[in-house]
Amino acid sequence: MPVIETIQFRKVLNSHVEFTNEFIIKMQDGSIGIGSSPQGETISIYEDRKVLSSPKNIIRTIDSDGYLGRSLDQAAFDQYLQQRIPAFGRNNAYALSLAFYMAAGTPLSLSKSWGHGKEMAAAPCLCLNILNGGRYAYTNPVLSDFSEYIIVSKSHNLEEVIGNHNEIQRTVKERLAGQSKVVVSGNPVSRFSTTDNRECIEFLFGILEHLGLKDRFDLMIDASAGDLWTPEGYRLTITDHSLHSEEGFHIYWLNLIRQYGIRFLEDPFREEGFESWRNLATSEHACKIIGDNFYSSDAARIKEGAANQCTHGAIIKPNQSGTVTAVRQAIEAAQRAGQIVITSHRSISTESTFLSNLTCSFGVKYIKIGPLMTDYSAVIRLNEIIRLTGGGPCS
């Protein structure tokens, strides 16, 4: 089994040009692995807000706990890291787990190392971030209470889908350039004639219709409704300042689903609004209710939520799980429960391609990726998917 000889760290830049921790693990056989963690801006109640442990202290603790010079496999190291998450922080634990995996595992053969079938899986359908709302709106920012308006490809043909994506993005940018602007959290965003989230849907649908592409994509909305929750109810503070009770917000979503045929709805309620999740997921409509912050990529929560019919699917973000082993368990729990699995990037990312390997290894049908035109790390992950699936154009 692998034996860790040394652990070092350095600071590297993430996609927001901020320094983040990267760990370097060297094994006694000379193999080396590196790992750094992405981060989210809109994060769940289950994620770390702030952890004070320095990388030096974390490495000292691992050494004093006897994990340097000891034979251990990925599962054993990850079990230790899970126990230390309160002290190390989830993102640091994930970075260490990934570094161990890269040093001791076979990163280009996840399906082989985890006992799955053929490595050349079909390319996943892309969930492409087109409009951003909420308080962290950077790419095609619009006045909206909801974080993301996403188009979900119905095709696995990456060349075709990316060509369509580029045409949509170009048209979106041209049309938003002519819209009036307001400032939200210090960012200028485009607004429409009214302060109504429906206008964002209609704007995007209008472009898809204009380009003749409406039948090639489904619509997905990431509401991140935990950020809208107040002790009084769900307040739409960015648009019309309306206040909605749990029941009222259920009706709000049903109206949008039925009016616009929304196919995927992510985090429509706060993390602890279990009854609201179940009521919407079991209502008569074709929309798939997807848990992101609701599950925070935790296998036990996914199993419980699926058993209680709270969702139809789960977003999987590796750093939320905390370790390589835990993210594998989260995907397997979702698949066993018959849930739609959607792997996902984070809004503050690094250039790691582990998400691409994970997606292809487990035959995950969907991946949230992007924004492709403003975050090149997303292009790096997409290129890795092309390599793993043969999904790009060939000469």
Image (cartoon, rainbow, N blue to C red):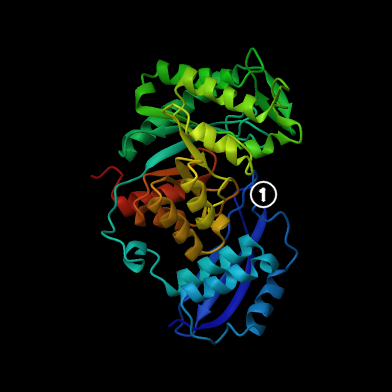
Q: Looking at the rendering, in which quadrant would you find the N terminus?
A: bottom left
> From the viewer's perspective, is 170 left or right of 213?
right
The residue lying at 58 percent from left, 74 percent from top is: 80
The residue lying at 39 percent from left, 51 percent from top is: 335
> From the viewer's perspective, is 116 left or right of 131?
left
Instruction: Report x, y in % for residue 308.
Output: 50, 45
Q: Mark 1: which amino acid?
A: Ile
**Who is closer to the viewer here, 391 or 393?**
391
Q: Label 1: few (<14), some or many (≥20) within 10 Å?
A: some
The secondary structure type at the circle numbered 1 is loop
**Quadrant hosting residue 36:** bottom right
Tell me if residue 111 comes above or below residue 138 in the rendering. Answer: below
**Who is closer to the viewer here, 140 or 284?**
284
> From the viewer's perspective, is 8 left or right of 182?
left
Q: How many numbered discs sit on the rendered protein?
A: 1
Instruction: Report x, y in % for residue 282.
Output: 47, 33
Q: Residue furthest top?
A: 193
Tell me if residue 61 comes above or below residue 180 in the rendering. Answer: below
The residue lying at 67 percent from left, 17 percent from top is: 195
The residue lying at 62 percent from left, 48 percent from top is: 40
Instruction: Report x, y in % for residue 182.
Output: 71, 23
Q: Residue furthest left?
A: 395
**Who is closer to the viewer here, 281 or 138?**
281
Instruction: Report x, y in % for residue 132.
Output: 59, 32
Q: Which residue is mark 1?
A: 45
Q: Is residue 221 visible?
A: no
Q: Is residue 62 visible?
A: yes
Q: Looking at the rendering, in which quadrant would you find the C terminus?
A: top left
